[in-house]
Amino acid sequence: MQALTSADLIPYEEYEKQREAFRADIIGLKQRRRISVGPWMTLVFENRRTLQFQIQEMVRVERIFDPAKVQDELDVYNAILPAPGELSATLLIEITDEANIKERLDEFMGLDHGEKVAIVADGEEAFGEFEGGHSHETKISAVHFVRFRPTASMRAAFADLTKSVTIRV
């Protein structure tokens, strides 16, 4: 997927005018790219449009106008873009029980290390490769970026609606 550049971003004032329509479009897109995995975990598969939205929102919320800082945001999110033949997703651990949030999150400790999350298709597995820095021995983040590198036969199975594709945790 082609990297996003500052030319892909809508200027701040124009984005403010278009934001509601743009946001509604992206929400619909993300719903189609969202897969629940059990009661507390969701994967949202990313593409240029979903990541452009994230950058637009970061620029808006943090009022980033310095071109170098905008480029920093582009660099962060471009690292999440899937390369040809890959899938990349934001993995969200969604715990709404405020009283037990730490306890529930701790149950996911180690999720981002080793072969714990996989896409299974055509008898093969593509294990998730997690971006580092989101957890350590005593703490796990509720948001992770994960990349999958499916084989050609797995990608063919994704396109064949008669084939089973599962996500395993």
Image (cartoon, grey):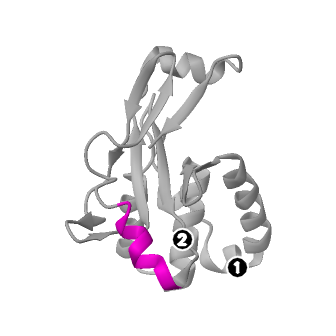
Pair 1/2: label in front = 2
Q: Who comes first in sequence, dot 1 or dot 2? A: 1
Compare residues 39 and 47 and report the one nearer the observer: 39
In the rendered structure, does residue 105 fall within the stretch colored magenta? yes
Q: Which residue is mark 1?
A: 16
Q: Is residue 100 above or below residue 157?
A: below
Residues drawn in magenta: 99-108
Q: Which residue is at a point 44% across and 70% down the rendered structure image?
A: 104
Compare residues 52 and 105 and report the one nearer the observer: 105
Q: Quadrant of residue 140?
A: bottom left
Q: Is residue 139 left or right of residue 14?
A: left
Q: Is residue 115 above or below residue 38?
A: above
Q: Which residue is mark 2?
A: 95
Q: State the image coordinates of residue 86 (x, y, percent, origin top left).
A: 44, 33
Distance from Cα at disc 1 to Cα at disc 2: 31 Å
Taking the image as drawn, is residue 158 in sight?
yes
Element assignment for label 2: loop
The C terminus - image quarter: top left
Amino acid type shown at disc 1: Glu
Q: State the image coordinates of residue 133 (x, y, percent, origin top left).
A: 25, 64
In the rendered structure, does residue 8 fall within the stretch colored magenta? no
